[in-house]
Image: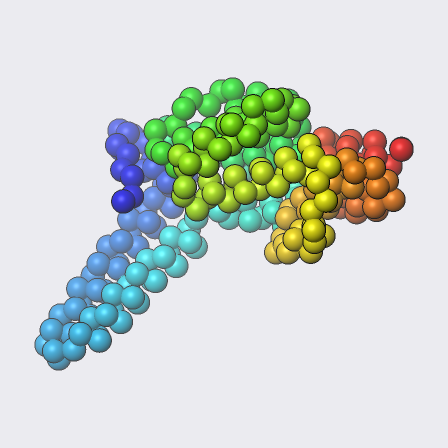
Amino acid sequence: MAEKIKEEKGKITYGSYTKKQEIAVKSSIIIGAILFGLIFGLGIILESFLIILVGGIVSFFIMIIIIIKNDTLGKILREFYNTLDYEACEQKFIELYRQPLHSESRKVLMMNQVDLLLLIDMERSSGIFDLIDMPELKQNIGTYKLLKLIIKFNKNNVENFHDEISILEKEYTDIINKRIIKNVRQEYEICYTQNIIEGIEDKLSKYNNNFMELSSYSKLMQYYDVRNNQIKAKEYAKKVLDFNTNFERLNSQASEILKK
């Protein structure tokens, strides 16, 4: 069952980041309802359940298309994943922060910024996270707790990692947090064990944007460095630097490996 959250007077509805997006989402619901009502009526007249079923599916997909096309935060993230231009992305985040956002939307926005900064500037990432109050919705609470664990992980504080990740894994089973947990577990095995992960390069060769590709090279660089295979570690360190990003933290790690 979808979680509900109270509206806040004078604020944009939760999940929307601009008035334009809010209007588009509400309009999509109205359009979908009207379209389904018309098709439903036609189906009743023609005594055709198939028309009603197809009408429901079509109305639903029209709503989804309108919502996706007006997904403000999604557009910003997709653009960053391809351009890797954090400064431009941050300016768009700042513009959204100036909007009269619902408090829960503001927390989600900040958590996304924290996540992006993990490869760029650990101190800034941690500093922004410290400003976020605990979210209200369960899925967002799960993401918040996972980010807290990831920040500890990135600061080499992994003493209670297995206990903490196991608790979160049992408590938060939604698709988004399950994916985050899977990635965190993989990064732990890469960075803090000597385990040989069979087919690691194949597992990390599936990416559909530049950010995923860069992240994969970063993981492989660390994987081989931890296992003292400096030839392969340097190979992937060079690939990381070839992206020519302003990701200070990641670039520093790659440069240090190349000095070995």
User: Residue 127 placed where, x, y %?
Assistant: 57, 20
Q: Residue furthest right?
A: 260
Q: Is residue 183 above or below residue 201?
A: above
The residue nearer to you, when weighing 64 against 168, is 168
Residue drawn at x 37%, y 31% is: 104
Residue 10 left/right relative to 20:
left
Q: Position of residue 1 (x, y in %)?
A: 27, 44
Residue 229 position by quadrant: top right
Quadrant containing the C terminus is top right
Residue 99 visible in the current orientation:
no
Tag count: 0
Q: Is residue 52 above or below residue 101?
A: below
Q: Residue furthest front?
A: 195
- Residue 246 in the figure: left or right of residue 154: right
Q: Horizontally, is 205 left or right of 150 in the view?
A: right
**Residue 64 placement: quadrant:** bottom left
Residue 173 picture location, percent across and down = 41, 41
Q: Quadrant of residue 139?
A: top left
The residue depicted at 13 percent of the width and 79 percent of the height is: 46
- The answer to whether residue 37 is visible is yes
Write the residue at 43% across / 55% down: 69
From the viewer's perspective, is residue 39 above or below residue 109?
Answer: below
Q: Position of residue 136 (x, y in %)?
A: 34, 29
- Look at the image and name its color scheme: rainbow
**Residue farthest bottom in this picture:** 46
Determine the residue positioned at 65% across, 38% down: 189
The residue nearer to you, when weighing 67 against 133, is 133
